[in-house]
Image (cartoon, grey):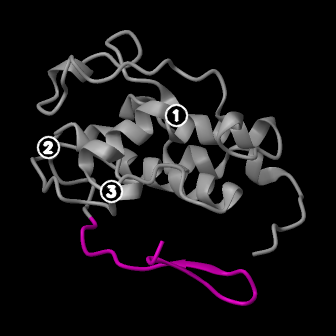
Amino acid sequence: PQNLLLDKKGTLKIADFGLARDETILKRAYSKDIVTLWYRPPEVLLGIDIYSSSVDIWSAGCIFAEMLRRAPLFKGDCEISQLFCIFQVLGTPTEKLWPGVSSLSNYNCDFPQWPATSSLSKYVHLTNDKAEDILTRCLSYPPEQRLTAKQALQHPYFSQEEEPISL
């Protein structure tokens, strides 16, 4: 994505904090037109208007998957197409999988029904179980079940020594 800047030494810098929010401020309704489409989380696509930093964790998961597969994981060309790209990989969300999903304003009980996937390895070249775990936990449907930024940084995936992937 255009907001990630990588130099020749592999130093990553994040740019464009135009929609940054202070989490200590009382939650209120925000704009629904956030996040570049391919990295936009399903709850925003489905119409939620109060969201948290979990939207950024979803985006980070999408970027991580893109780095591993060298192509975007969810490449929709409009909001409904983006939702269907997500559903095709993760399965169409149900109340059992994501309690409250059917009450979101853009949810439609007539959405095509794709089965839930047992492993993201069908779509992403995962280098090990730790990579699969962190990706799965970043791309969890219920936002409250996603890793926090602190949990992600403390994840065992980041404690292992591996050779960098050449770009």
Residue at screen point 67% across, 47% down? 154
Front position in the image: 73 or 131:
73
Residue 10: quadrant of the picture: bottom right
Image-quadrant location for residue 42:
top left
User: Which secondary structure, mark 1?
Assistant: helix
Residue that appears at 45% across and 78% down: 2
Q: Does the CB distance between marks 1 and 2 fall below 8 Å?
A: no
Mark in the foreground, 2 or 3: 3
Give the number of the disc on residue 164: none
In x, y percent, where is residue 147?
A: 52, 39
Q: Locate residue 23, reporting x and y percent.
A: 28, 54
The residue indicated by pointer 1 is 89
Q: Nearer the viewer, residue 58 or 116?
A: 116
The boundaries of the magenta stretch are 1-20
Q: Is 141 positioned to the left or the right of 29 in the image?
A: right
Q: Amino acid at mark 3?
A: Asp
The residue lying toward the viewer, choosing from 3 and 155, is 3
Q: Is residue 101 above or below residue 143?
A: above
Residue most toward the bottom? 8
